[in-house]
């Protein structure tokens, strides 16, 4: 069974930066389609960004140019570098991956951006 553990959330002022990390309990090579999602109270969980094993990335339009997703294979971690944060980015951020055909989610990390 694989576990994903997020860290790096916190409170930051608008325009600031945060770096989220998702630590996997197995080699990233065994996990496919890793991505970040976010959720605010009363709303559905929203996809934010995805990176595939070959390195190709995709982002929701609202974060393009501000967020960068990448896999740190040496540390078996998925990273989301978030710059120029906006109050609208406030949410609980989750990482997700597919391991042996099953989707696995982390427990989430809170990101709060003050105006």
Image (cartoon, rainbow, N blue to C red):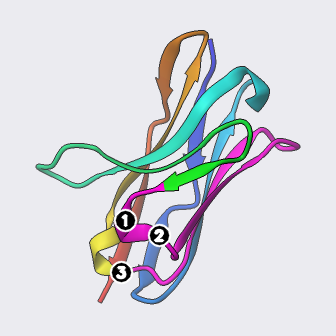
**Res 61 label:** 1
Vertical relation: 113 (above or below) 33: below
| Disc 1: CA contacts within 10 A as few (<14), some (14-19) or many (>=20) | few
Question: In which quarter of the view is residue 33 placed?
Answer: top right
Q: How far apart are labels 1 and 2 at the CA level?
A: 5 Å
Is residue 71 covered in magenta?
A: yes
Q: Quadrant of the C terminus?
A: bottom left
Pick whichever of labels 3 and 2 is earlier in the sequence.
Answer: 2
Residue at x 42% of width, y 69% of height: 63
Percent from the top left, x then y, of residue 109? Answer: 45, 52
Task: State which region is magenta.
Answer: 59-85
Percent from the top left, x then y, of residue 105? Answer: 47, 30
| Disc 2: CA contacts within 10 A as few (<14), some (14-19) or many (>=20) | few
Q: How far apart are labels 3 and 2 at the CA level?
A: 13 Å
Residue with the mark numbered 2: 64
Tags 1 and 2 in contact by the CB under 8 Å rule?
yes
Viewer-proximal residue among 42 and 65: 65
Residue with the mark numbered 3: 86
């Amino acid at each position: 069974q694989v576990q994903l553990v997020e860290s790096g959330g916190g409170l930051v002022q608008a325009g600031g930066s945060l770096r989220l990390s998702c630590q996997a309990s197995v080699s990233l090579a065994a996990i496919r389609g890793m991505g970040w999602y976010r959720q605010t109270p009363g709303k559905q969980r929203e996809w934010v960004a995805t990176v595939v094993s070959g390195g190709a990335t995709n982002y929701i339009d609202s974060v393009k140019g501000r967020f960068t997703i990448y896999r740190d294979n040496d540390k078996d971690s998925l990273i989301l570098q978030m710059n120029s944060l906006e109050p609208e980015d406030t949410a609980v951020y989750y990482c997700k991956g597919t391991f042996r055909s099953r989707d696995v989610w982390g427990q989430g990390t809170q990101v709060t951006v003050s105006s």
